[in-house]
Image: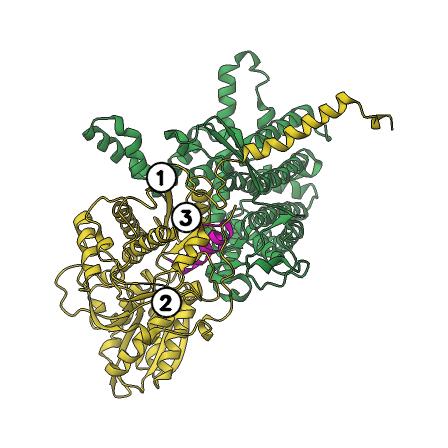
Chain colours: A yellow, B green
Amino acid sequence: MSKGNLTRRGVLKTGAVAGAGLALPTYLSAAGHEGFTNAPTGSTVTLGFNVPQSGPYADEGADELRAYELAVEHLNGEGDGGMLNTFSSKALQGNGILGKKVEYVTGDTQTKSDAARASAKSMIEKDGAVMITGGSSSGVAVAVQALCQEAGVIFMAGLTHSNDTTGKDKRANGFRHFFNSYMSGAALAPVLAANYGTDRKAYHLTADYNWGYTTEEAIKSSTEAMGWETVAAVKTPLTQTDFSSYIAPVLQSGADTLVLNHYGGNMVNSLTNAVQFGLRDKQVNGKDFQIIVPLYSRLMAKGAGANVKGIFGSTNWHWSLQDEGSKAFVQSFGTKYGFPPSQAAHTCYVQALLYADAVERAGSFAPCAVVEALEGFEFDGMGNGKTLYRADDHQCFKDVLVVKGKENPSSEFDLLEIVEVTPVDQVTYAPDHPQFAGGALGSCNNGA
Amino acid sequence: MFGLNKKDASLLLIVAGLVAFAPFLLNPFPEGSAMAQFNAGYPDLMQRFVIFGIFAIGFNILFGLTGYLSFGHAAFLGVGSYAAVWMFKLLSMNVLPAIVLAVITAGAFALIIGYVSLRRSGIYFSILTLAFAQMSFALAYSVLTPITGGETGLQLALDDPRILESASASEGNIPVPGLFGLEMRDSFEMVMGSWVFTFNFGYYFCAVIMLIAFYLSIRIFRSPFGMMLRAIKSNQQRLNYTGVNPRPYTLAAFVISGMYAGLAGGLMASMDPLAGAERMFWTASGEVVLMTILGGVGTLIGPVLGAGMIKYMENIISKINSDILHGWFAFLPDGLEDLVVTMIYPFIGKGWHLTLGIVFMLVVIFLPGGLVEGGQKLANLFGRKKADNPKSASTEPAE
């Protein structure tokens, strides 16, 4: 009780200590508080390029990184400007973003959600990145997207094709330019009907993970809608390298079409096995046996070699497109690296530019301002024709390419030919489409 | 102190000191300098240091004491993570129930796997544990997708029930894990000149748990139970002949070390609420073996050092790219600069595995006792006078 005595000296002491105690944290944490995570304070802004540099998609990752380096060059006003010259929005001046010079840090996702998140976290916490972009797998995209939402930075997805990225796992701070499984199905179905008829029996081999499931579902529902019948859908382990035991039962099943919902090395191996088994020379139900690969990439076509000839698939973009944007991009990429860019490089390059443009138009790096600028944004001149960033799910809607393995390739890059450019209306779906059901965007997060 | 002898107590104090001042120790270079690349004092990496420290400490209880080499320990880490994330989804974002359930689930899982695997010893035991872990991985990756989220991993969603929290998701953002209102990601930055030190609540939470885990491990090492485990390692047959059944002891050690792994998994999920199947992949199990051997098998502090070393290389070395190298060597003449960069390039960035491999080989060849032996040798070198009582306080070998 005697301690309760108030003396002048005691009050002053306590007051001074308490005041210092209260003031200390405010002073100490004053730096870098602009109302959002990693607000750029100096004359530079840091972007984080999180791409697979090791693991099964390392080739794509390397190409993505090349594209980002090119994009940074163009944003900083070096090089020939690439798509900045053809982009319909003219906000970017070639003087960085909002006058700040663009710098970047890189990380390795290893195509593992954990490693990708660790790498993204270090970019955010250590390097002060204000935007994370890249990746070559849907699992990684979804994981990093959730992290960015939590941390309050923008995520611009790289190559991710699963419906879930902008479906059940969508987030307000995440944006996807790449197309998705549903769009592949919707674009492929009419071409398949025109070439192979409407009464086929399909047999699916599906990579046993998230992307495989959504792709199988998308292809199934759009082919069944035009009259095809699905005989069976068999899951194959992602680590499988020899698919002969899966190919053998296909012929006994009475199916006359094989759909390979595989990507990367899986697709290269399963397609090679199928061709070696002579499936394509077979006649079933009075029809030639056919093989379909829903998601194609040039790197895969290269791996599968001559086996891809005449096989249909879909792709987001191809370097042989003749619009101004594609030509400008292929031109500056080719000049710098000596070969044409892949679709992964294209989508990453475009994402970097779209982000920079949105910041410029919003006049701020704050994630919520960027989200507002990107939502419902319509643009052109980026290689896919007129494109819309839909506000409901942050998915880009644009034309989809249906491609076919070229019969007589003229170079090691000229492996695919464009069969049809499916117009955007045909691949558009309602935001609450059953294949995208569940999940919610939530609200944008500015972070600290 | 705390029932420890003087050596162990001082070791515990040293570790506590290191852990408490880690934000300073790991950020020795000023912000913005070329060497800032090597700073490791950011929350995510510091959390990883202590979490994998816990994982390795637990692994060392099994491997260091009984000599049973489990090649499937990552399975328990994964199970712990999944359990913790499910608690976040169903119950609340408080980390305590999540961690408790993670430890219990991992312990139960270890009991089942250990009961079967421990019927064999040596290489057969290793293969059995490896098989179980790969089985768990395959289950988590595809078959059990509804429970584990498959390839994408188990994530929180806005519409999770979280029955103990009502208004949490009202602002449209998923709440973050915390301890009675204190968020794990809360950090506090201290600016001193050009140095920035980050103090993160999540890190200190993990650090306290790590110290408890470390203390428990010292007690186990010094207990009669620990002695029995060492007896199993040195000669199991003799133990059998003297009429002692070693199975209950090895099983207990296996379950304890599984619970440590579960604790680490639960903490990982608490720091970053996502559980992915890759956490259970066999390379993850191999990593903890590397950590323990790199640091020093059977020593108390070795596994923690090994864990720190590997995580440092994974997160720091792997992020150096060729541009940064060019920046460092810009002072050299052009031709020479390119040459130096070309020579170093294979060992950085995606080549960090190569660097790790070289370091691992050097350690195994020249320091079979791990980094701890290196420390001992240094201590002997510089403190000859104390030669008969070297600093082995921190480095008590197992045998």
What range is drawn magenta here? Answer: A137-153
Packing grade of label 2 (10 A; few <14, some 14-19, many >=20) is many
The amino acid on which the numbered mark 2 sits, given as a three-letter code, is: Asn
Left of A334 or right of it: where is B277?
right
Measured along the vertical axis of the image, is residue A339 above or below residue A376?
above
Q: Earlier in the sequence, mark 3 or mark 2?
A: 2
Measured along the vertical axis of the image, is residue A292 above or below residue A94?
below
The residue labelled by disc 3 is A365
Q: Nearer the viewer, mark 1 or mark 2?
A: 1
Q: Decide whether residue B324 is among the magenta residues.
A: no
Q: Residue A23, located in which quarter of the rendered image?
A: top right
Residue plotted at (17% across, 62% down): A414
Measured along the vertical axis of the image, is residue A436 above or below residue A43?
below
Q: Earlier in the sequence, mark 1 or mark 3?
A: 1
Parent chain of label 3? A
Measured along the vertical axis of the image, is residue A134 above or below residue A29?
below
The residue labelled by disc 2 is A180
Residue A446 visible in rendering: yes
Parent chain of label 1? A
Q: Secondary structure at mark 1?
A: strand
Which residue ends up furthest to the front in the rendered image? A8
Q: Earlier in the sequence, mark 1 or mark 2?
A: 1
Left of A336 or right of it: where is A25?
right
The CA span between labels 1 and 3 is 12 Å
Q: Decide whether residue A142 is among the magenta residues.
A: yes
The amino acid on which the numbered mark 1 sits, given as a three-letter code, is: Thr
The amino acid on which the numbered mark 3 sits, given as a three-letter code, is: Phe
The disc placed on residue A44 is 1
